[in-house]
Image: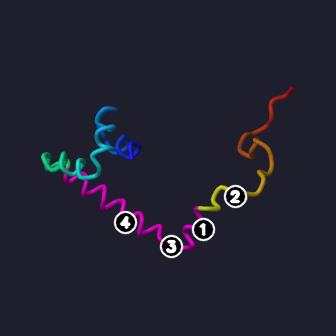
Amino acid sequence: MGFLKRLLGGGSNEGEREGDDAGPDAATASAAADPAGQDEIERERELLRAEALRLDNDLIQRQLRYADRSWTPPAQGGTRRAEDGDPPAG
């Protein structure tokens, strides 16, 4: 929970410790005092909800799970290209 608070712009370490004990109601209560902060929280919630709906597909989940095992063919040729001209004599 502390990670999300730091990511979303939480306060100092003391605020994080207090926020963990207070629960999610403390975050919404502090944002209620600041209307711009409330809009920001609602926007973040909407973005997270949309992202969760987008990723809620078995095929996409499988692709994400095995993305690190994807195969790419080995590079062919060297670093020299046709437009480089003649190689330096030596």
On screen, 64 above or below 24? below
Tell me whether circle 3 and circle 2 mark residues in contact (CB < 8 Å). no
Q: Which residue is mark 4?
A: 50
Find numbered disc 3 in the image and state the secondary structure of the residue it sits on: loop
According to the image, label 2 marks what residue? 69
Q: Main secondary structure of the magenta part?
A: helix
Is the residue marked by circle 4 packed among few (<14), some (14-19), or many (20+) residues within 10 Å? few
Marks 2/4: CA–CA distance: 27 Å
Q: Which mark is residue 57?
A: 3
Q: Identify the amino acid type marked 3.
A: Asn
Kindly report the distance in space between the C-alpha atoms of the residues bearing marks 2 and 1: 12 Å
Separation of disc 3 and disc 2 at Cα? 20 Å
Residue 39 belongs to magenta span: yes
Asked whether 85 or 53 is in front, the reply is 53
The numbered mark, 3 or 2, whose residue comes first in the sequence reads 3
Compute the Cα span from label 1 to label 4.
Answer: 19 Å
Name above or below for residue 19 compared with residue 50.
Answer: above
Q: Position of residue 51 (x, y in %)?
A: 41, 63
Compare marks 1 and 4 and give the one earlier in the sequence: 4
**Which amino acid does the dot numbered 2 rest on?**
Arg
Of the residues shown, which amino acid type is indicated by label 4? Ala
Q: Is mark 3 in CB contact (under 8 Å) with mark 4?
A: no
> In the rendered structure, are the residues bearing label 1 and label 4 in contact, judged by CB atoms less than 8 Å apart?
no
> Mark 1 = which residue?
62
Q: Is residue 74 left or right of residue 6?
A: right
Q: Earlier in the sequence, mark 3 or mark 4?
A: 4
Is residue 56 covered in magenta? yes
- Percent of width and height locating residue 49: 35, 64
Quote the CA–CA distance across marks 3 and 4: 13 Å
Up the image or down, 68 lies above or below 85; here it is below
| Lower sequence index among marks 1 and 3 | 3
What amino acid type is highlighted by mark number 1? Answer: Arg
